[in-house]
Amino acid sequence: MIVIFLGPPGAGKGTIVSELRKHLDIPVIATGDILRNAIKKETDIGKVVKKYVITGELVPDEHILKIVENRIKEDDCTEGFIFDGFPRTLNQAQGLDTVFNKLNKHIDQVFYFDTSKDIIIKRLSARRVCTKCGTIYNLYYGPSNIADICDKCGGKIIQREDDKEEIIKKRLEVYNQETLPLVDYYQGENILTKIDANGDVKSIFMKLWDRLVELDIIRKDGS
Ligand code: AMP
């Protein structure tokens, strides 16, 4: 199964992916996580991309496409994967099509998590993340049991630099300009499912799950 999770920052893609991973043993390729990891480790690519990530700009397509092409060639990706936060530009989508043609792979479905601006801002400004294991919390919808400490690993919980209000605005601007056109692109290919992502995690997850079953991408029992 190869699926793409498309949607604005704050649509809940990361949270839904974590839910899905409880039922399906399939890797998630989240370009944002890969980039943050590279920045943290101060790798060569990490040093190049840092200035884009911290200001909410998109990292140039050639870096992203190279990262993704290398990642999908790894052994754990042979049975499929979920893209979270990729592609984010028309050029990346076309680049992905070229890579997939070469590797004889195809996209099963693109899920577009449609969310209102008010909800996005509320979710993002209250989002917190564990610095150690990456678990996502939300001050309104799902805080940790003890403030600033991760329930799962005891790591420190922080607010991402790019979840501060000014940067959120920038990221939404970039999303509307660069990423939103992908909805039409994949609709044109007839592989887009729109999911109303304004509700709670459980209802969004059920809509996704039912659609995956309906499309025959998974069976009802998740196999
Ligand atoms: P995310 O965790 O998906 O919200 O991504 C955080 C930041 O990483 C974005 O604001 C961009 O700076 C960068 N980024 C992540 N994925 C991509 C991508 N596919 N193309 C360009 N930049 C990306």
Image (cartoon, rainbow, N blue to C red):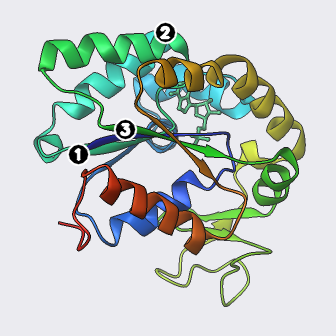
Q: Which residue is mark 3?
A: 109
Query: x, y percentage for residue 51?
Result: 66, 24
Residue 38 coordinates in the image, percent (x, y):
44, 37
Q: Residue at x 66, y 25 (%)?
A: 180
Q: Nearer the viewer, mark 1 or mark 2?
A: 1
Badge 1 is on which residue?
Answer: 1
Quick one: label 3 or label 2, which is nearer the N terminus?
Answer: 2
The tag earlier along the polypeptide, 3 or 1, is: 1
Return the residue at label 2.
91
Locate residue 44, reporting x and y percent. 41, 23
Of residues 112 and 21, which is closer to you in this image? 112
Quarter of the image holding residue 127?
A: bottom right
**Element carrying mark 1:** loop
Total tally of numbered discs in the picture: 3
Give the residue at x 84% y 45%: 117
Q: Is mark 3 within 8 Å of ligand 1?
A: no
Quadrant (top left, top right, bottom left, bottom right) of the C terminus: bottom left
Label 2 sits on a secondary structure element that is helix
Res. 10 visible in picture? yes
Which amino acid type corresponds to the residue marked 2 in the rendered image?
Answer: Asn
Secondary structure under badge 3?
Answer: strand
Q: Ligand 1 falls in which quarter?
A: top right
